[in-house]
Amino acid sequence: MTAWTDIPDSMIQQGKPIRATDGRALRDNPAAIAAGADGAPRVQGIALGGVYLGSFTQDGKRPQALVGLDKVGLLVADVITVGSLSGGIVQIALSGNGGASYGGWITLYTEPSTTGEHAVGRLHIDLATGAWRVRLLSSDGSTRITEGTLTLPPGVNAIRLTKANDYAVTVYDWFVLGARS
């Protein structure tokens, strides 16, 4: 992580040459702010809104992980499930050490049974409070809303998802909608 460097106001004045250390700080401080370096100003949640983290496909009992979530407050995923025969049980595991180890599997929700059809929706996970909510709309028009609260490990910074059964394909597109300090 890039270190934060304080630049005294007296060093940045009209007509005064810039010292090399101040020039490097001007170059490196934005990265230090983004990384949450010690001493750096904190980025407000609104500044992190809409950051796209990436996508993964869950198509069996192979856990898929998101790591590097140290400053993430609200994590949101657009969810698409295709062809769930009996309603897949989606489970989450949480880590406070960057994904080196995880706690036990916790059941989040059961996907709608959509044999030959699909379901779309959105999953919200608040990594500051543990509150979560999923809303899925099946192709038959039915809606399923499930919510709860997770017990978070200290400094939660990684999650992984798997399915306990019915390994239909589910695609998650992940976004950050808020930060935590």
Image: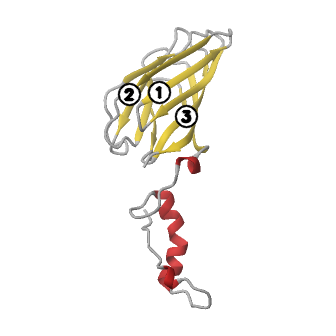
Q: Amino acid at mark 2?
A: Leu
Q: Tag 3, which secondary structure?
A: strand
Q: Amino acid at mark 3?
A: Val
Q: Tag 2, which secondary structure?
A: loop
Q: Tag 1, which secondary structure?
A: strand
Q: Residue at x 38, y 30 (%)?
A: 93
3 and 2 marks in contact (CB < 8 Å): no
Q: Quadrant of the N terminus?
A: bottom left
Horizontal and vertical percent position of residue 55:
58, 37
Is the residue marked by circle 2 packed among few (<14), some (14-19), or many (20+) residues within 10 Å?
some
* Viewer-closest of 107 and 17: 17
In the image, residue 38 sits, relative to residue 152, either above or below, namely below
In the image, residue 165 sits, relative to residue 36, either above or below, namely above
Is the residue marked by circle 1 packed among few (<14), some (14-19), or many (20+) residues within 10 Å?
some
Q: Is residue 62 visible?
A: no
Horizontal and vertical percent position of residue 77:
57, 32
Return the residue at label 3: 76
Q: Amino acid at mark 1?
A: Trp
Q: Is residue 127 visible?
A: yes
In the image, residue 64 sits, relative to residue 109, either above or below, namely below
The answer to which image quadrant residue 6 occupies is: bottom left
- So how many labels did they put on this image? 3
Among the two numbered marks 3 and 2 on one chain, the one whose residue lies closer to the N terminus: 3
Among the two numbered marks 3 and 1 on one chain, the one whose residue lies closer to the N terminus: 3
Which mark is drawn over residue 150? 2
Q: Residue at x 42, y 38 (%)?
A: 128
Horizontal and vertical percent position of residue 45:
53, 47
